[in-house]
Amino acid sequence: MRVNNPQSRSWLNGLAIAAAFSPFGVSAGAAPNTFEVVGTTGVSAQQFFVGGINKVYILDKAENNPLRLPGTNKPAWATEYDLRTNTFRTMEVATNTFCAEGAALSNGTRISVGGNKAVTFGGLDGVNLAGTLVQRRWCQWSVNPGGALLQAKRWYPTVETLEDGSVIIIGGCTDGGYVNDANQNIPTVEYFPSKGQPNKLNFLLTTLPANLYTLTWLLPSGNLFLQSNLGTEIYDYKNNVEYPLPNMPHAVRTYPASGATAMLPLTPKNNYTATILFCGGTNLQPDQWVLSFNIAAYPADNSCVKMTPDVSTEWEEEDYLFEGRSMGQFVMMPDGRLWMGNGIAKGTAGYGNTSWAIGQSFGSSPLHAPAYYNPNAPKGSRWSRPMGNATVSRLYHSVASLLADGSILTAGSNPNADYIAPGTPNYPFPTEYRAEKFYPDYFNRARPSPSALPKTLSYGGNYFNVSLKSSDLGKQSSALPKTFVSIVRTGYSTHAMNMGQRFLQLNSTYTHNDDGSGMLHVSQMPPCVACFPPGPAMMFVVVDGVPSNGVMVMIGSGQIGAQPVGVAADLPGTVTDWTTSQSMPSPSKNAKHSSSSHLLPSLPVVFLMACALIQLM
């Protein structure tokens, strides 16, 4: 957000939609635990999402980027970034996507919700833009499919995908400023596709002023876990009932404190029970969110806490960070660890024209050292630090995401009201266009290349088999017991968080063959739609800590609406020495299963090689 910025005066309410799948393509061979600047994004990556194996879609705010749309003098603020070539193409965007939010619907469509008011190129007051783009051979943004509009102006809203593949849209504000206030607060929730009039949410009245981008997760119970400012609650959205929980300890984690947040991996071992982790942020109190003191010099918090709300509503202390960090970002890795990078040691998110701002940035002391968090390590040793440091500072308006090759892409950073060129006097943190990859510690190890991975997964139903060669297992029989299949949704990345990010390990057994090869017998998704809402995700096979390249998979029916659910078929028992001349076990229509279960067939879905992007005003 920004302060004293003329961009805050003329509204264009928007909601943008995109569907994207791309052919498989990845890179490998980089040194582990290192960073590499791989390209430029054309516009500053305030928001982005992985739209397929090879493509990332980037949204900036409306500003005077040097990049122009072809044949016009209009600055671009959206691009499609090709991970194979590290090049981009410009995309037309009619709304000001400044501080919007997004998610994936269950049919593969991506939505970007809300945003700032309309401005002309350069940040002056503007008139509303209108129009619908024509669908082309490649992805483009379009406006207002079917005439759909949000029912409230929402800047900094929260978006979370639900069990039926629709999304809930929570809160926001209308006019801006460093934090929210009662005069512009939007204390309601609505849905897309619409489910009627918005419902009032009392939680958004009691958590002012730091209640923008309310941190939200759909729990396996089917309720929503909400955390904002110091407040926490369970929200039964189906019945519009709120259940207050104990306040967040130590620090504020929501924007602009911007702590790192994530739901920890859902696994068979933890019975797919959700634990939410919060790290860093700032310990500013509710009456301290003012601009009368030097926020940019205020140390960030280093505490970490977690809660398992479907089991206990008490906060639990977790291993602290190596240093205080605001705008640190968690990225789920295929092996179940979390990567943290980006951020600052002092200050918060935001920018403005105050005497103490660093240029215009409300944050300072960028942090370049990432860290791994291993939830399975003994307490006291869950954090570890790779050797390499990032080249590029990532402050306000930065992003990070897992890619299909197992690397992590970071981009963005622009704590300024408009484009600031590198080298501009008195602006140490200019607009950043460089894209940088981090290569995790498994990048110097041979990657498995499993065969027969499915393109769709159902909730419950028949298991499937995954074949692994001896070379995939490192020619070691001990690797097969340490092999599993993970499903990762990378989420919609903006403002140091990936909304909708989720990791689930599928249940599996295995057969080890006497020639050193093996086969995993893998369950479908657990029969719990709220554990992992329907829609696109990536599937990895992880062998002794080393992931395969990810493949795109559609979870559920591929349609918006109630999802078919069965109970998982029983898996074959583990076999450690199976003679290869015998036929391998395969799913059976008559597979044994519990008396309450039934089997579901594979669910068909069409993967698009091209797509249309749609904007709603």
Image: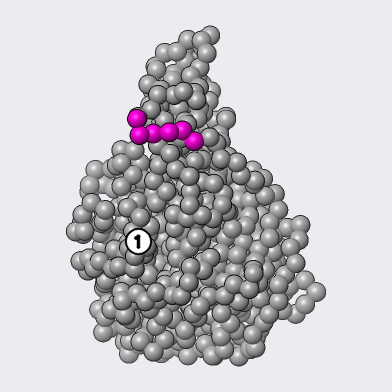
Q: Residue at x 26, y 72 (%)?
A: 230
Number of residues whose C-alpha sits closer than 10 Å to that of mark 1, classed few (under 14), some (14–19) or many (20 or more): many
Is 597 magenta? The answer is: yes
The image quarter in which residue 7 lies: bottom right
Q: Residue at x 40, y 24 (%)?
A: 592
> Eyeballing the image, is 453 above or below 19?
above
Determine which residue is flagged by label 1. 224
Nearer to us in this view, 35 or 223: 223
> Eyeballing the image, is 164 above or below 229?
above
Q: Is residue 603 visible?
A: yes
Residue 292 location in percent, x, y?
Answer: 32, 90
Q: Is residue 557 left or right of residue 348?
A: right
Which SS does the magenta portion mostly show? loop
- Magenta stretch bounds: 595-600
Q: Is residue 429 visible?
A: no
Is 289 magenta? The answer is: no
The image quarter in which residue 15 lies: bottom right
Give the amino acid at mark 1: Leu
Residue 369 location in percent, x, y?
Answer: 40, 57
Q: Is residue 251 left or right of residue 95?
A: left
Q: In what quadrant of the picture does the C terminus appear?
A: bottom right
> Eyeballing the image, is 261 above or below 413?
above
Q: Residue at x 22, y 48 (%)?
A: 380
